[in-house]
Image (cartoon, rainbow, N blue to C red):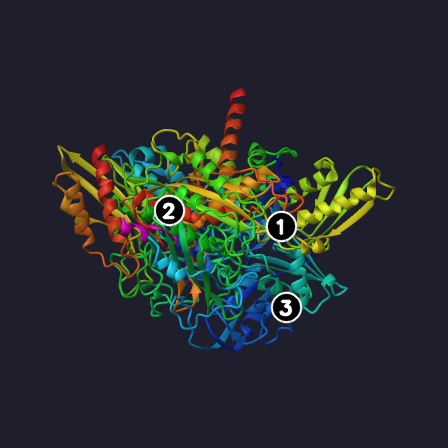
Amino acid sequence: MTDRLESREKVTGAARYAYEYPLENPAYAAAVQSTIAKGEIAEVHADAALRIPGVLAVLSCENAPHLHDAGDAELALFQSRTVAYRGQFVAAVVAETLDIAREAARHVRVDYVSEPFDVRLSADDPRLYKPDKVNPVFPADTEQGDPEEAFTNSAVRVDATYTTPAEHNNPMEPHTTAAQWNDDGTLTLYDSTQGSSPTQETIAQVFGLDRTHVRVIAPHVGGGFGSKGTPRPNVVLAAMAAGAVGRPVKFAVPRQQMFATTGYRTPTIQRFRLGADADGTLNAIVHEVFEQSSTVTEFAEQTATPTRVVYRAANRRTAHRLARLDVPTPSWMRAPGETPGMFAQESAMDELAFAAGVDPVELRIRNDTDTEPESGLPFSSRNLVACLREGADRFGWEHRDPAPGVRWEGRKLVGMGVAASTYPAYMRPNKATARAEEDGTFTVRIAAADIGTGARTALTLIAAEALKADADRVTVEIGDSALPQATVAGGSAGTASWGTAVVRACESLRGKMNGSVPPGGLEASADTAAELEGRDAYARHAFGAQFSEVEVDADTGEVRVRRMLGVFAAGRIINPKTARSQFIGGMTMGIGMALMEESVMDPRFGDYVNRDLAQYHVPACADVRDIDAAWVEEADPHLNPMGSKGIGEIGIVGAAASVANAVHHATGVRVRDLPITPARLLPLL
Amino acid sequence: MDSEVTPVHTEITLVVNGTEHRLRVDTRASLLDTLREDLGLTGSKKGCDHGQCGACTVLLDGRRANACLALAVAHDGAEVVTVEGLARDGRLSPLQEAFIEQDGFQCGYCTPGQLCSATAVLDEADRGWPSAVTGDLSADPVLDDDEIRERMSGNLCRCGAYMGIVRAVREAARKTETEEARA
Amino acid sequence: MRPFVYERATSADEALRLHEDGAFYLGGGTNLVDLMRLGVEEPARLVDVSRLPNGEIELRPDGSLLIGAAVSNSDLAADRTVRESHPMLAQAVLAGASGQIRNLATVGGNLLQRTRCSYFQDADKPCNKRNPGSGCPAREGEHHNLAILGHSEACVATHPSDMAVALAALDATVHVQGRDGERTTPLRELHRLPGNEPQRDTVLDPGDLITAVEVPPLDIPSRYRKVRERASFAFALVSIAAALDVEGGTVRDVRIALGGVAHKPWRALRAEEALRGAPAIGEEFQRAAEAELDLAEPLRDNAYKVPLARNLIVRTLTELGEQS
């Protein structure tokens, strides 16, 4: 139970985030967004803005320097006249102060030649296509057996369509960059990023620099939840602006502008079919997903991939269809794929339980599997059943009367729901160094990121264990691309991937030390690339069971979550204190997904209109009454030296379905379209 | 130059964490930007700049307020306490300690606002201020978990540290009460 | 934000003198500064009226309240007298915004805050309220939280204040100092329905300054209830301020005002009329609520507000009846 190592800095305001570094004579940038959804920029009128005292420069497609292709067209800032979505950055103003920059941005007039556009996602859109792969490297479609036939012949069938809306990550710290070009031509970026090394690499490519000529500094990051996993246009904008004015430039994307420019979770339409025997044993699973990307890049969310992992069934089909619409570009958001996909699957399982008259916990246990259904691979470890049993026990599930819509407390209806969760245990190659000093202290270096996950603390504990040293003698340096190259804080792979490199570096150091440290200290390094090549073939996933109890006001349709419990099997838990917060944080975001989060697209304008935190609701303190997380002991020798799986994302995966299932149990109403707001629920009560 | 676009400046005084500052500010400047950009007090955070997240919460003349919505010029002469001013002589306040103990934060970006807000919540409860969940408005409210949750709802935390935040405020309230009883 | 000249007024007379074309009065700034930063409001001059000598709450011998316009929302809700004499008003204030916003916000400013319609707040989109004649995209767009009552072709916005809903139920009057001197206006007539001039939220003239709100005594059970999409810190979907006096099973007096349903706090006079003298039973509450909501003209995506408002009326009156 170790406190976060940076706790004191965070509670005293000393922890610096990207906008907060003292820079010599900084200038401030403000961006201009496209007011059309599709077309060409005819002309950019910068004169009025340039006349404002304090304005230093206006950048746009008419004067921007040439940038190089870094494989992400979102970063080709001001490189063409084409407008691909409403809200796209089309110009930027740099000025002496933020107030001047923002005001001047309003005086930049852009003339457009507008074209017809379409931002509507529908399951019958003729432009839907099968992408070559879904993120990151999965096939778009899979099929086993004869799912149609098996479904048709099943005694109990569920055939339902579920939808999830576009959702925005909304980290509390906006996407922020402070950029400074140095006298030697190198670029320093203080950036709000989930990965200083990947950002370094990408931005170096964009500006045609050697990787080592860009340094990205990010010791503290105010959340990301996927949206800071790859650099967004704000990084390029700040660097370009700094180059244009020859001064450091700071740029934080205003909250309203984040809704178009910093990514979001694609809306999904999901048809889910389950065919089972009378006792609920599954014969057929069919999961068809419709989702969107922009015309800028293909981002294909892996929504049906968990359906390939969780339950046994001889016949199965999963399919993804993508529409490239004139919308802002979707991106990573906490447990991409698993989160919307498992909402559909676990809602459908609840419908099946009801239809078959089987207890929802028992139904999931009954359909457990020893091997990963599609690959046939053994699981490195799988304890879904243990999570379900432990959770049911702790939550008081045995007292649950299965009848929906019958438990009244005054004018409130009360119910309980369950859902399974899962998330892959990924590993990525990383480098690290470990250094011993004569005084018995150690320094471990790796360009990892702590975006609130507790990574700095976990890596310190991991290093101390590997060094057989007290943690207070070990310093772990992270959050700087000048450190050994590391992968992104994403895919719940951070601690496992970085930790492995840290362990290997520490082991190597101990080998060199041979009990003593020579004058001047000793250093060792590690690179885990080769180690990851030769891993045994296992299906590696974390699992969990999530339980919710809700109350529904029968007069107003307001849903409040009274209790929520998640029990997880995620390998070894490195630091229980921060791990618990990760799980609970994921579940809290799951309450948001279940009950309030929805980005509303106006098809006539082409943008998300509820673009601030007063209109896009995330859970407030009062929405979280009682959330608890627990885990089952899981010793898995096939993962990594720590025996850990990721924990940052699985907490959200089953949360929304557990709430929706509890709403059904409370009211008898099945809401298949998230979020479950009074507007949706009340008319059905 | 066109008066519509020429910045208007004015001199103000702010007493921040006990130190008096004489400043020349753009009338448009928020108290938040003034603290962060002019005084280098970057503990107060900008999450939304529209009073919708609470990350910028400071104590303004003794009361919690969104520094992003407060124009610096309108608070000439004000006393401001930011997160940097909560610890005394390097000693953390009971709330700061409780936030660490209860893991009342993850990324830390909302934390300064949470702490300033919580500091005021304890004070408001002391003064008998009610909240939207206070059952009997004629009585002094008791700062139970429902009250804490409601009173802290102006400070959003996207990491979802609310469970820890509520525990921390509860613990700090208890500790403060005990200390007061002793005194 | 457009540059502006800032002036601090120390008296109402001075405020009026300082106010000239293009000027706005500044209270707590919780909405005005927000709108200026969005480019929705562009005053050339701000006249700060938050420190006028009208920051007091006075309980008068007849039981009425005189609330200075510069009183903060927090002080209003925390005031022991208000909590005892007009609990519905304290509840309404506490239901609004957050603790830190209520500290900044003033009573006068609260009444004059503007709609939170998405389109009004986006200076790059048409909006008849912001830019008369440009059209109302909300009518066919995102309007799930907009008006069901009293809207027009030109505007379907709602008034966002909670406090004003309680004040409408309480028959408050607003003290206004204008260029032609002082006058009072019933709060129910302060805010307008949008009609063809949605740019005008209220009946006030340029330069008019709200100096106080007068609230008659209330000695019957009352309460404020707000329905929203999260448990706190959100604008109302529908809210209700109600008071009910039952004697011998018969309704002697009743007040009902709804928030979140119209361009102004909606006093449900039809429902009140239907109830006076009627038996204080659920069927009558239901009938009265329906009489009022017969006037509703829901939009494509906000029809749920009709049963929501109806249920709120019935539920709140039922609870007040049990209390009475």
From mark 3 to mark 1, how far is it between C-alphas? Answer: 23 Å
Question: As shown in the figure, which amino acid type bears the numbered disc 1?
Answer: Gly
From mark 3 to mark 2, how far is it between C-alphas? Answer: 44 Å
Helix, strand or loop at mark 1: helix
* Above or below C219: residue A158: below
Question: As shown in the figure, which amino acid type bears the numbered disc 2?
Answer: Asn
Q: Tell me which chain the residue with mark 2 is part of.
A: A
Helix, strand or loop at mark 2: helix
* Above or below A54: residue A413: above
The answer to if A178 sits in the magenta stretch is: no
Q: Is residue A48 visible?
A: yes
The residue under label 2 is: A661
* Above or below A287: residue C245: above
A128 or A40: which is nearer to us?
A128
From mark 2 to mark 1, how far is it between C-alphas? Answer: 32 Å
Q: Can you give x and y, in whole percent of width and height, for residue A36 in the image?
A: 46, 72
Q: Which residues are magenta?
A: A675-685
Q: Can you give x and y, in whole percent of width and height, for residue B102 in the image?
A: 55, 35
Q: Can you give x and y, in whole percent of width and height, for residue C184 in the image?
A: 27, 49
The residue under label 3 is: A70
Helix, strand or loop at mark 3: loop
* Above or below A437: residue A232: below
Classified by dominant secondary structure, the portion drawn in magenta counts as helix
A674 or C319: which is nearer to us?
A674
Mark drawn on residue A227 = none
